[in-house]
Image (spheres, helix red, strand yellow):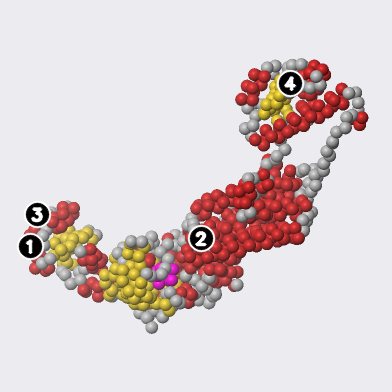
Amino acid sequence: MQPIIINNIDKKFGDVKALNNVSFSVEEGELFGLIGPDGAGKSTLFRILTTLLLADKGSASVMGMDVVKDYKKIRRSVGYMPGRFSLYQDLSIEENLRFFATIFNTTVEQNYDLIKDIYVQIEPFKKRPAGKLSGGMKQKLALCCALVHKPSVLFLDEPTTGVDPVSRKEFWEMLQRLREKGIAILVSTPYMDEAVLCDRVALIQKGELMDINTPEGIVRRFAQPMWAVGAGDRYRLMQDLRSYEDTASCYAFGEYLHVTLKSGGAGEDALCQYLSPHQDLTMFRTSAGIEDCFMYLMQEQNQ
Amino acid sequence: MRTIFFILQKEFLQVFRNRAMLPIIFVMPVIQLLILAFAANYEIKNIRIDIVDQDRSSWSQRLTHKILASGYFELNDAPLSVKAAYEHLAQDDADLILVIPPNFERNLVRQDKASLQLLVNAINGSKAGLANGYATNIIRSFNKDVRAEWLAMDERNGPPRIDVTYSNWFNQEMNYKYFMVPGILVVLVTMIGAFLSGMNIVKEKEVGTIEQLNVTPIRKHHFIIGKLLPFWIIALFELAFGLLLGKLIFHLPMEGNVLLIFLFAAVYLVVMLGMGLLISTFTDTQQQAMFITWFFIIIFVLMSGLFTPVESMPDWAQKITWFNPITYFVKVIRMVMLKGSGWEHIRHYFFIMCAFAVVINAIAVWNYRKTV
């Protein structure tokens, strides 16, 4: 049984289409990433799947239960971590965890093995009010609270937003371990570098899915040759590249500009020629990352 | 049931962790009772009076003495001209001017008739009314003395007249505090019930915890009961605490059965909590909830008969007070405490309150389902 199945979901807020005909499914024990910029509709989709919102059209099921008809059962068996920190800031780590355990009719001790790896990291501060924790610790606590009743599916809405790079890395390592325990995880993130850590990703923008594939698959489908170009005067370089008639796309990536050409690999020499007046010019072939693919798909959708 | 217990546990933990909460629970009633009961007083003393004595006779002197000896008045000045007294009235130095015209004594003796002039500063209506009343009473009594003396008779042989003696039932000394303190207790209980409960529910929305809480097996009635019950308990505790303070500080009488008050308060609080819940369903922040509650409570309190009797309101306003829960509780708590009314006297109000409780909570729960 597929833990999450989404069929043709539409959702509108007034005139704004938050979700437009979205369909995908998540396999058992899969870490599925929903990648997209702010306002793409990720949180709306999470709210529909966690039974907090009703879709205008389409259907969805979680663990075989319909999100409309069986909402009570779903609420009992999924773990949800909202995008905004939603635990009691005036209660301590321990009290928050115990509260969420008891309302699910269980105890912290009963499912301790599931949260142990994460909980030991925040245990030294267990008497501290949740509001006084750092961003990374807050997320770890929220994950503990979402796991304390041993859910079969985990919904994590932008769990690493506002968290330092080290904690982000740790957080993803925890997700990998949870996946090994057989929990299906749907996670959303605006960070492209996290996409490669998922089993499969769906790229979403303006409420529409652009692509669903493994991270490698998405990169592989991006077949065009790509060059990384750098020069002393980056601003002029970018202007020159954007006005170059053969340029298909040109984006700044770290210290280089990533460029693709309409003529593909054949245009390399011409481009070299064109850019030769630049000082300190470096230009080499590079392989596209998932971020390049996203930019490319975004541009395609906008056209 | 277990779920409600866990929510209650969490609520109490949060309530008592809130720094503002303990002062609200223990200091607010003391301050309200002490300050309001002493300050909100209808007996007006130290009314500043200007006496313009243009007669300067022995009778006018006696009248002046009698007025100042009453204890209600304090001589501001005794100018010679009425004009100077007007000045004092205009500058708010004097509240009242008594003008004793020239030939007051002569007219009184010769024509058996004399006139006086009272000028009252009526900016504060109730103060003016009382000042006027006190002065008129003193002058009437003076008039009576004059007549008795004039006719050289003692009172028993004087001309026949009707003397009214009276006794104040249920509050013999007309102790203002006996009447006021129970009403202030009602306001106290209302504040806890309506304000804190509504804000407590909205807080979950404002902070965002409701989103997490909704994806749990908690049912709506668990949540509502768990959120409201702590304030029901705290408010009843406040009532007990306030009654105890009233007993210790003001020696409030308790003629009736105190359990009747608690029974009524228990239902009354359900109404107030329902109001808090209803307001919380169409607000998103604690600030909004507070202002809306404030709007209703101020109307309810001012129209409750706590400060001004309901009977003196215009007809349409009296009809509005039928829908004001505070009116009923103020009435019932005074009836039970001062008059010793029993169940058969307050039964009627009790059932009205039960009806309120059912209606407002039904609307609140129905509205809650629609919005969250």
For the residues labelled 1 and 4, the Cα–Cα distance comes to 117 Å
Residue drawn at 64 percent across, 22 percent down: B86
> In which quadrant of the rendered image does the N terminus of chain B lie?
bottom right
Quadrant in the picture for residue B145: top right
Q: Nearer the viewer, mark 2 or mark 1?
A: 2
The image position of residue B360, as x and y in percent, is 58, 61
Which portion, as a residue range, is magenta?
A: A46-52
Camera-side residue of B312 and B272: B312
Q: Amino acid at mark 2?
A: Thr
Name which residue lies at 66% across and 47% down: B310
Identify the residue position indicated by label 2 in the image. B281
* Crowd rating for badge 4 (residues with CA inside 10 Å; few <14, some 14–19, many 20+): many
Q: CA distance from mark 1 to mark 3?
A: 13 Å
| Labels 2 and 3 within one chain | no
Q: Which residue is mark 3?
A: A277
For image coordinates 23% across by 61% down, the residue present is: A253
Judge depth for marks 2 and 3 and give the one in front: 2
Name the chain letter of the residue that bears numbered label 2.
B
